[in-house]
Each structure stands twice: as C-alpha cells, then as structure tokens.
Image (tube, rainbow, N blue to C red):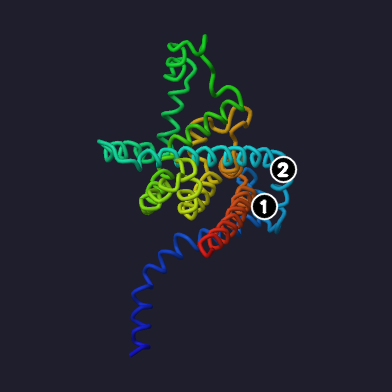
C-alpha cells in the first residue's frame, strides 16, 4: 500500500515537475552552458567555440563592469537604507488608531501596486526639464530660480532613480513592519510607561527588538530586488547620462541584447546570481541566529 501511495504521488506530481523543469531548470542550465562559450551573434562565422571561464575572467576585468558594480552598490545602499527608515516611520504612524485608518493604509499601498515600467515612465514625466511637475512645483514655491535638468547629471540622475525606487518600494516594506507591529502586545508599552520609559526608549527597548526578524527579512528582500533592478532604470534613464545609472542589470542587457555577446552577457548574469546566492546565505544565517537567540 505504501508503494502504491508513492507511485500515485509521483504520477500526480509529474505534470508540475515537468513544467518546473521546462521553464526553470532547462533555461538555467542552458544559459550556464552559453556562458562557457564565445557566442557572438555579430560574428556568426566564428561559430560557438567553448572557452571555459574566459567570459567570466573578461567580465571581472572589464572597467565598465567595475563602474556598473559601483553604481549598483551605491544604488542598493542608498535605496535600501532610506526605504527601511521611511517604512518604519510610516508603519509607526499607521499603527496608531485614528479615524479613516483603513483608507490611509489602502492609499499608502497604491505606489507599490504600480508596475515598475509605469513607475519609470511616470517619473520621467515628473522630472522632465521643460514641463515636469517637479520643476514647476519648486519654481512656484521659490525654491529654484530656473528649471533643473534632473537627469542630465550622473550623480543627480542616480539620486532621482533612488528616489523613484523609494517611492514605489517603501509601501511594501511598510506593510511588513505594520504587520509585525500589530503582533506586539500593548501591555509591554503600558508597563514601560509605568516604569518611566519615554517613546524613544520604548522604541529601542521594545519595538525594535521584537520586529528585528521582520527587519532582517525586509532588508534581505529589498537588497536582492535592488541588485536585480533593471526595468525602472531602463525606462527612466536608460543607464545614462554617461553610464551614471548603469547598474549591473543594465550592463547585462547591453552585453546580451545590444552588443549581442550572449556568452559574456550570460556570464554577467551568473556572476550576479552567485553574488545574490552568497548574500542570501549570509542573511539566512544571520536571521537563524537572531531567531534562535
């Protein structure tokens, strides 16, 4: 009977397993095999010779990859840090009872529901140097005396990309923190208030320790997602100006679909895959240690 149950389970799982292999395992292995070959569609006469790890060595020595890695790290650190701070602050405000609380919570989640491509196009209109609403607002308030080309300077453009990412992704992190805050018993705050603890002391002694596992998860998710950013940057700045917003995801796109060097493009993708995998392992161990203690 046990053998029959195992056979039935295998038969029932076979269609799902076949789909997973078809859409996940095969492309994963196929792209890794491509990364080990010199596959340049602009020179089909050269064929697809096996080069081993030469594509990986080329990418690791490429100055453009170093620049894209620097831009990526800057983008990830700035975006994730500011998103965590803003999300915690908004969650603390929305956790307090007030009239119309459900409506405010629903409206706060709207930016997260917007697709990344739509978000990039929207911010491209907002930051337009001629008719953008940001220039119009700042000029009408007297903060600036002339319209600013927000996406014309590499550092300023990267800051605008970070801000556009913060505007979209902060609501999701806020939702995680809000759910964690609602699991904290109010008796702890009452006892702390009786002992003479103020709001700041209660936050660092009660709130922050109890939401720390959620904080680890939020930081891990947003770091991984930020490392893979492409669609927002492609629609907003296309990696410019002067590659000032060209993150590794955009560099991979250029190598694969602009230069048509599929082998090197696949190598970049796997370098980032290994980096993200290492980051996930570090976060998992840190989270496990935090939960255990």
Q: Residue furthest left?
A: 99
Upstream in the sequence, badge 2 or badge 1?
Answer: 1
Q: Position of residue 15 (x, y in %)?
A: 36, 69
Query: Residue 79 vs residue 103: left or right?
Result: right
Image disc number at residue 263:
none
Element at label 1: loop
**C-alpha gap between disc 2 and disc 1:** 16 Å
Quadrant holding the N terminus: bottom left
Q: Which residue is mark 2?
A: 62
Dot 2 and dot 1 residues touching (CB under 8 Å) = no
Q: Residue furthest bottom?
A: 1
Residue occupying image coordinates x 65% and y 42%? 69
The front one of 280 and 6 is 280
Element at label 2: loop
Query: Residue 289 vs residue 10: left or right?
Result: right
Q: Residue furthest front?
A: 195
Quadrant holding the C terminus: bottom right
Q: Which residue is mark 1?
A: 38
Asked which quadrant contains residue 11, the reply is bottom left
The front one of 280 and 249 is 280
The front one of 92 and 156 is 92
Q: Position of residue 140 (x, y in %)?
A: 43, 11
Residue occupying image coordinates x 47% and y 37%? 86
Q: Alpha-carbon neighbours of circle 1 within 10 Å: few (<14), some, or many (≥20)? A: many
Q: Position of residue 227 (x, y in %)?
A: 56, 45
Q: Position of residue 190 (x, y in %)?
A: 38, 49
């Amino acid at each position: 009977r046990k053998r029959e149950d195992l056979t039935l389970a295998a038969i029932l799982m076979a269609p799902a397993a076949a789909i997973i292999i078809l859409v996940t395992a095969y492309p994963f292995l196929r792209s890794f095999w491509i990364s080990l070959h010199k596959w340049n569609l602009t020179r089909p006469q050269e064929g697809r010779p096996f080069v081993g790890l030469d594509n990986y060595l080329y990418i690791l020595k490429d100055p453009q990859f170093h620049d894209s890695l620097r831009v990526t790290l800057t983008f990830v650190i700035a975006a994730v840090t500011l998103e965590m701070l803003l999300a915690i602050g908004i969650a603390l405000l929305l956790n307090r009872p007030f009239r119309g609380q459900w409506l405010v919570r629903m409206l706060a989640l709207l930016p997260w529901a917007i697709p990344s491509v739509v978000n990039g196009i929207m911010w491209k209109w907002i930051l337009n140097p001629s008719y953008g609403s940001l220039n119009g607002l700042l000029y009408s308030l007297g903060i600036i005396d002339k319209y600013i080309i927000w996406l014309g300077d590499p550092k300023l453009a990267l800051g605008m990309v970070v801000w556009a990412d913060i505007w979209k992704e902060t609501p999701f992190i806020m939702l995680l923190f809000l759910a964690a805050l609602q699991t904290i018993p109010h008796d702890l705050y009452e006892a702390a208030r009786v002992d003479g603890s103020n709001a700041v002391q209660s936050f660092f002694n009660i709130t922050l320790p109890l939401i720390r596992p959620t904080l680890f998860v939020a930081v891990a998710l947003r770091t991984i997602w930020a490392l893979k950013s492409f669609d927002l940057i492609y629609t907003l700045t296309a990696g410019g100006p002067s590659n000032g917003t060209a993150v590794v995801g955009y560099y991979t796109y250029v190598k694969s679909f602009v230069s048509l060097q599929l082998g090197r493009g696949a190598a970049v993708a796997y370098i980032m895959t290994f980096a993200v995998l290492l980051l996930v392992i570090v976060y998992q161990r840190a989270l496990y240690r935090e939960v255990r203690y």
